[in-house]
Image (tube, rainbow, N blue to C red):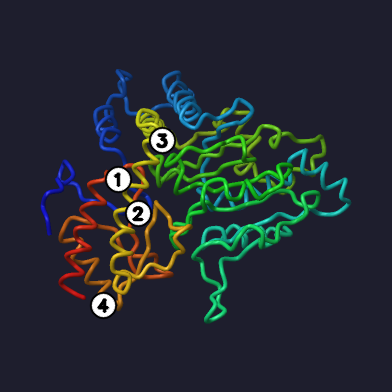
Amino acid sequence: MSDSVPEPPYDRVWNFSAGPSTLPITVLEEVQRDLLNYKGQGMSVMEMSHRSKAYGQIIADAEATLRRTLNVPDNYSVLFLQGGGTGEFAAAYLNLFASKAVREKQRRLGRQLGCDYLVTGSWSKGGLKEVQRLGGRPNVVVNGMVSATSGAVEYRGLPPAAEWALGKPEETAFVYYCENETIHGVETPADLVVDAVDPSVPVICDMSSNMLSRPVDVQRYGAIVAGAQKNMGPAGVTIVIVRKDLLERDDDPECTRNLPSVLDWSYFDRAASMPHTPPTFAIYVCGLVFRWAEAQGLEALERLREARAALVYGEIDARPEFFRGGVDRQFRSAMNIVFNLPTPELEAKFIAEAAEHNMVQLKGHRSLGGIRVSLYNAMPLDGAKKFVAFMKQFYTQNH
């Protein structure tokens, strides 16, 4: 294999983990420099009171930087929460049905509103199951694609929007979807869902694994939820960007009776994300990543993500009988590329030999097997080049 690609600094590996994932080297270097004594405070951020002036500036800067980077409108709140995308399965449903706007709409209808779910893989399927468990009335707009040969449901893309079973706008509280499915390697094209949904219905989008990888028109969404541990920082922080009118409550105490405070977006909004101790260190690191992303620019990060993905998919397409990708081209994820080899034995050999070449965390999700290469924002183009060079060598030696 060619050695023309330089190795990462500090004896680091090429980390293709699906999450927690690789972080920008410059961010890690700054964390290291300030770990023992943050900016002359005489203590680490990990030791700092969240009520201190210094930490108040850290979290305020993090929010301000994210707002600038994503161009978040003033009528949206930015919240730093915990619980991950999985916690937001419940939180999104409970908060929307506690909102004044949805409750008024439900009173006009005279019965419980439905909520629309687009199921494109494991994570959106998890969101659907959580709402069913909580007693909601989810309408499955689409559930993957049906195989023409077996009749089985396959998560490899979406049918045309004209075939979606969207609920009537006057009967629907919100539409939910996960934009990038990390397990199945399915990414919904930007604006596909919001273009199809009536503007009166809030769209709730889980962007946990592709946030900050491309520009997004925030004002087209009711709320965007995202775990930080893919593109934005370490595990432990969940970002919610929510339109402020959806945080409004009426005076009826019943509206929040089934909404725990720890999941209540309005509760966190009133306390500027700090009704209690937040994950202080993780938010601090996220703020550094936001600053890094702002300096790069989302347009440049989008070009980089497309370039990385094109290298890997190019090799898959060149040898489809060996590198077997199953996702329809229009829905191929630029973040998580999944494929199989002809046998499980070859897959195990591929993973082991890749590790010998300093490339790790390539094993597919336990539910699917195969290979998964995750190419998040902090992965340089050289990482994709190194991986493709290994693919070529492995094919030559094993096909």
- What amino acid is found at the position of numbered circle 4 in the picture? Glu
Q: CA distance from mark 3 to mark 2?
A: 20 Å
- Depicted 277 relative to depicted 106: above or below: above
- What amino acid is found at the position of numbered circle 1 in the picture? Met
Q: Which residue is mark 2?
A: 374
> Do residues under tags 4 and 2 come within 8 Å of each other at their CB atoms?
no
Residue density around tag 1, few if under 14, some if 14–19, many if 20 or more, within 10 Å:
many
Q: Which residue is mark 1?
A: 379
The earlier-in-sequence mark between 1 and 2 is: 2
Q: Which residue is mark 3?
A: 299
Residue 188 % position (x, y) = 52, 53
Look at discs 4 and 3 and give the one toward the viewer: 3
Residue 153 % position (x, y) = 56, 73
The earlier-in-sequence mark between 3 and 2 is: 3
Residue 394 % position (x, y) = 19, 67
* Disc number for residue 345: 4
User: What secondary structure is marked by label 1?
Assistant: loop
- What amino acid is found at the position of numbered circle 3 in the picture? Glu
In the picture, measured across the screen, residue 30 lies left or right of residue 3, that is: right
> Do residues under tags 1 and 2 come within 8 Å of each other at their CB atoms?
yes
Residue density around tag 2, few if under 14, some if 14–19, many if 20 or more, within 10 Å:
many
Q: Nearer the viewer, residue 99 or 347?
A: 347
Residue 297 % position (x, y) = 39, 31
Q: CA distance from mark 4 to mark 1?
A: 28 Å
- In the picture, the quarter occupied by the C terminus is bottom left
